[in-house]
Image: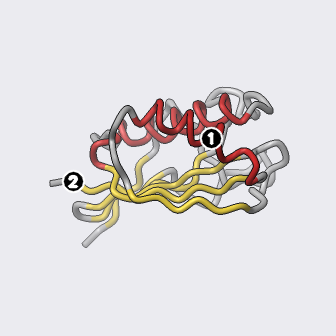
Amino acid sequence: MPKEIITAPGAPTTGFTDKSKAPPIAQAIRCGNMLFVSGQGPLDPDTKEVVSDDIQEQTRQTLGNLMAILAHAGASLENVVNMRVCLRDVNDFPKFNETFREIMAGEKVTRTCIGGTPHRKGVNVEIDCVAMFD
């Protein structure tokens, strides 16, 4: 089964260490009825810079980037079955979760949330997901 590379113009492609070079990853890959979205962070799609140091603003931007990729692939949060979250500071979890709940608007997914160190300075949250199509 061939894989389809998804590139949404309304979201940045992360995974770069040198902005002058193309990233070695895809924003998302669809294979059959599954869509795998690479980890998204709080980057402005145009500047590729971190939008803020506030965890709630970072969470909004991160989920906005993820939703832009989903939409470009013909999906939405309704299609998402699993998310993985990495928080730089686990003490941010209550504010992250409050914003996550607001944006999810009652939509349920399975989710893992861990503390770790995202690869880019200033990135305090990163989220990836798996979505399913009918």
Disc 2 or disc 1, which is closer to the eye? 1
Q: Quadrant of residue 99?
A: top right
Q: Compared to 53, does 66 lie above or below?
A: below
In the image: residue 82, left or right of residue 9: left
User: Pointer 1: what residue?
Assistant: 96
Q: Position of residue 78 (x, y in %)?
A: 28, 43
Q: At 49% across and 33% down in the image, what residue appears?
A: 9
| The quadrant where residue 24 appears | bottom right
Could you tell me which secondary element the residue under label 1 belongs to?
Answer: helix
Query: Where residue 24 is drawn, which disc sits there?
Result: none
Q: Position of residue 54 (x, y in %)?
A: 76, 31
Residue 50 x, y percent position in the rendering: 75, 34
Asked whether disc 2 touches disc 1, contact meaning CB atoms under 8 Å apart, the reply is no
Mark 2: which secondary structure? loop
Q: Nearer the viewer, residue 126 or 27?
A: 126
In this picture, residue 133 sits left or right of residue 105: left
